[in-house]
Amino acid sequence: MKILNSQLEIKQWAEQVPLIASTEARILYETDGYDGPLAGVLVWNGKKYYFYSYDGTNEEIKTTGKRSYAVIEMSSEQEKEEEYWQNQLVERVGAVNEYDENNAPIFRVAKSKEEHEKYSKEYQSELKSYTIAQGQIKARWELGYYQPVASK
């Protein structure tokens, strides 16, 4: 899901909702990442939500030692779209973006670099954009910052 709201707007709204413990939610998969997850789908209280990092620069993240996320309630359309693209990724490329029960990435090698590139181009060009309403942000969540290790 592409979020059209500014990162600052999401941050302002997220800071008005309760902070949940890192152990209360579990990442199912990421849809965007850089030295850790930036966005994706998690489970909290038995329900799927979209999570979106609203932190600023990498320097700010390294200073605090964590990333902060808005926990966003998805509409049925948004949830279906996320599931569609995740299923496409797993089928065509492999489960390269999934996490374990401790919110640690499971490093897997893609089936094919060419198919991964093809999928990524389709994903970027066909993914729908959404403006998030303030009421969709149900919580904020923090995870320790980490540098991923190379897959084997």
Image (cartoon, rainbow, N blue to C red):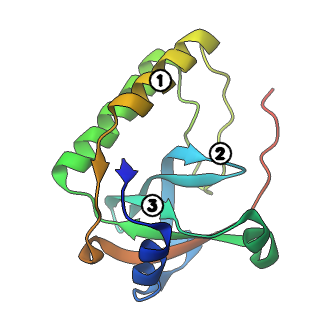
| Residue with the mark numbered 1 | 121
Q: Looking at the image, is mark 3 or mark 2 nearer the viewer? A: 3
77 to the left or right of 38: left
Residue 3 position, x and y percent, is 38, 56
| Residue with the mark numbered 3 | 51
Q: Looking at the image, is mark 3 or mark 1 nearer the viewer? A: 1
Q: Which residue is drawn at 28% across and 60% down?
A: 131
Cα distance, mark 1 to mark 2? 23 Å
49 to the left or right of 116: left
In the image, residue 100 sits, relative to residue 58, either above or below, namely: above
In the image, residue 107 sits, relative to residue 22, either above or below, namely: above
Please name the amino acid that badge 1 sits on.
Lys
Residue 93 position, x and y percent, is 52, 19
In primary-sequence order, the first of circles 3 and 1 is 3
Q: Residue at x 60, y 52 (%)?
A: 37
**Label 1 residue SS:** helix
Q: Looking at the image, is mark 1 or mark 2 nearer the viewer? A: 1
Please name the amino acid that badge 2 sits on.
Pro
Task: Determine which of the numbered discs, if any, sits on residue 105 in the image.
Answer: 2
